[in-house]
Image (tube, rainbow, N blue to C red):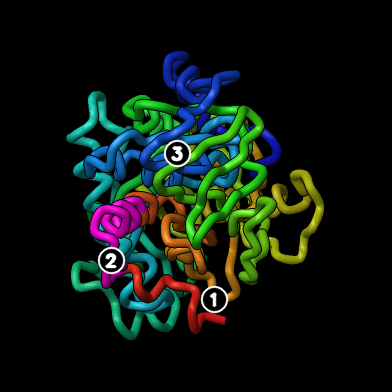
Amino acid sequence: MASGRTIWADLLSDEERTVLDLGAGGTPDPRPDVLVVGGGIVGVATALACQRAGLGQVSLVEKGRLGSGATEGAAGLLVPEAHQGSDPPRFVELARASLEMWRELEMALPGGVGYQDMDWIGLAPQPDGFVADPPSMVEWLSADDVAGLVAGLVAGLMGNGPAARVRHQGRVNPLRAVSRMAAQLPQVTTGVAAIRLEEKGGRVAAVATTAGLVSPAAVIFATGGPPDLAGLDLQIPADLVKGHLAATEPVSVTLPGSVAPVAVQIEEQRLLTGGTIDADDPSPGVNSNVIGVIKRELETALPQLRTARLSHQWCCWRPHHPDSQPVIDRVPGLDNAWFTSGHYRTGILMAQVTGRLLSEWLSSGDQPADAVPWAVDGRW
């Protein structure tokens, strides 16, 4: 979930905003081949992957509006190489595959998904693991190089080492991507919550929703955190980690893509900044002190922005497991139920590959090799 005013809906067309409320007040298909519960970006990408894989009638239900959870509060960055050296190599490989899938979907869907190619520049100091084992395509930039790319950046602010530049990373407006993908789905119902699971013989017989009973051949829960409904007892450690972001009004500064940790250039010549980790802040709303720190850090890095106004400021709660890695697994004890959870800060990036793995699992009946590391067994 997100609190405050996020930038993303304001950048959509009226038609794109309308899609986010698809099927509001309607009734889900009572007997779909695949029921996807959860209308964040992972759920919508998974439903689309199942449809494109030819798995029959695919139905999606979302208790609120599409993208209204952590998706709406995300930065929308697709930068797998930034995870090199800090996340497991198998995660980085899947993230690279997911980026390629985003690019393919941009070409395949009518109007695309709003994918934007960009360069990523990581200012020094980088994490030790990244420095020890950098991506093969990294370019190392001197201070003079960076100064030529980012006019006005305070020299030496982030450290004296070289900056890392990786070309052809990406970003999306998360809500535009959700809207464009959802428009391709045959059956979406918003404002409908799953409230109870009925099991028979080791299979899901039905899912009771606030709009009636659904009896799917298979069900996938993509609810951010582990699914929480009566009749399903998943003992998986999980929490929500708060973070803040902000966007500026249109500014004269032009960045060459994403300059971490300063900001990323988005539509209308605006800058997106922040992405804090506020694990010790349990408050439900935007913390003005944190936003103040974000603004001061932006002004310190780029003094010409001291008069720039923050037009949007928000916080969101990211679903998180203790190892900061996602779960992609079958629901224990149920032959026809799967779930994915805990994508933390990488749900946008990993949405496509997660959907592919789940659709492959449903199609073949066998766990894909790439999904094995994200199973629950042995994790905690």
Residues at badges 1 and 2 in contact (C-beta under 8 Å)? no
Looking at numbered disc 1 in the image, what kind of residue is underneath it? Asp
Residue located farthest toward the right when viewing the structure as drawn: 283
The residue positioned 62% from the left and 28% from the top of the image is 211
Instruction: Say left or right for 257 vs 315.
Output: left
Q: Which residue is mark 2?
A: 366
Asked whether 329 falls inside the magenta stretch, the response is no
Decide which of tag 1 and tag 3 comes sooner along the chain. 3
Quadrant where the image shows the C terminus: bottom right
Residue 61: x and y, percent?
52, 35
Q: Main secondary structure of the magenta part?
A: helix
Q: Which mark is residue 162?
A: none
* Residue at 44% across, 34% down: 31
How packed mark 1 is, by other alpha carbons closer than 10 Å (few <14, some 14-19, many 20 or more), is: few
- Does residue 52 lie above or below 242 as drawn? above
> For the residues marked 2 and 3, what is the alpha-carbon distance in whole angstroms?
31 Å
Residue designated by label 3 = 174
Which amino acid is tagged 3? Pro
Viewed as shown, does residue 243 lie left or right of 80?
right
Residue that badge 1 annotates: 323
Q: Are marks 1 and 3 in contact (CB under 8 Å)?
A: no
Residue 355, x across and y down, in percent: 34, 51
Q: Which residues are magenta?
A: 355-370
